[in-house]
Image (cartoon, rainbow, N blue to C red):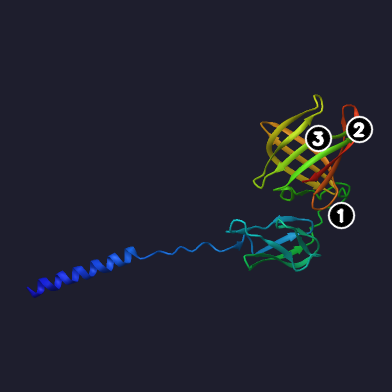
Amino acid sequence: MRNIRKVTCGCLSAAMLLTALTTAPVTVRAASEKMNKTSAKMTVGEKMTLKVLHVKKGAAIKWSTTDKSVASVNAKGVVTAKEEGKATIKAVVSKKTLKCKVTVKEAADTGAGNGADTNTDTNEKDVSALLAGKTYKGTAATPIGNIDVIQITFGSDGTAEGTQMNQATMVQEKFTGTYKAVLSGKKLLLTVGADGKSLTQELIAENEELTRMSATKEIAGMEVKIIIEEI
């Protein structure tokens, strides 16, 4: 009888312990904010986009650099390598400071000696990241008044959409597709392609941040200057 009581008590104790363990509250911690890169190597003129991961909805991110002459950063985390040296890019979010150490080197000179063609422009840069998340509107000033020529929004996923005026019918037409922007000096070649077709515009970049661009086009038999600005 005593042995039966001991076994019964043991089973009851084990059951109570198992119940306590399985009903105990479970605390799940949210992932903390972190930079997608903690270090990076860049060449002069190169651009890259830093991101803060696991950001709470609505949280503001404040970007800064320890040396803007070496590497600058804008409000969207786009870093531009300026000159050789080292700088630390900082992002402050939810009272937490995240850092990415950036080392900038001069770009290799590929056109030296042996009769290389020094007139060939080898400084083309893919600046698509600078357009991501922005919306632009293009207006042409004509003798009969301003005409809205184009409006385009660039997504962070590499797609773009908007409307462009058909120069033959003077009617706005929708377009959508993937985009790529290549900068050579101040000349920007923008291509938006979809369904085997492409919209290609050659523009002049009027500042490094690409917030304002311009182009000269013929519209309804008139040569006009189009100003394209971020809105």
In this view, the residue farthest toward the top is: 169
The count of marks equals 3
Alpha carbon separation for disc pair 3 and 1: 46 Å
- Quarter of the image for residue 105 reads bottom right
Query: Residue 48: horizontal and vertical position, in percent?
Result: 71, 55
Alpha carbon separation for disc pair 1 and 2: 43 Å
Report helix, strand or loop for mark 2: strand
Alpha carbon separation for disc pair 3 and 2: 13 Å
Query: Which tag is nearer the camera, tag 3 or tag 1?
Result: 3
Which quadrant, please, contains the N terminus? Answer: bottom left
Residue occupied by mark 1 = 113
Taking depth in this image into account, of 149 and 215 the one nearest to the observer is: 149
Direction from residue 115 to residue 194 in the image, left or right? left
Residue occupied by mark 2 = 223
In this view, the residue farthest toward the left is: 1
Report helix, strand or loop for mark 1: loop
Mark 3 or mark 1: name the one nearer the start of the chain.
Answer: 1
Q: Is residue 230 above or below residue 53?
A: above
- Quarter of the image for residue 50 reads bottom right
Badge 1 vs badge 2, beta-carbon distance below 8 Å: no
Q: Which mark is residue 149?
A: 3
Mark 3 or mark 2: name the one nearer the start of the chain.
Answer: 3
Is the residue marked by circle 3 packed among few (<14), some (14-19), or many (20+) residues within 10 Å? many
Direction from residue 31 to residue 119 in the image, left or right? right
Query: Residue 103: horizontal and vertical position, in percent?
Result: 73, 65
Badge 3 vs badge 2, beta-carbon distance below 8 Å: no
Query: Which amino acid type corresponds to the residue marked 2 in the rendered image?
Result: Glu
Q: Is residue 194 above or below residue 59?
A: above
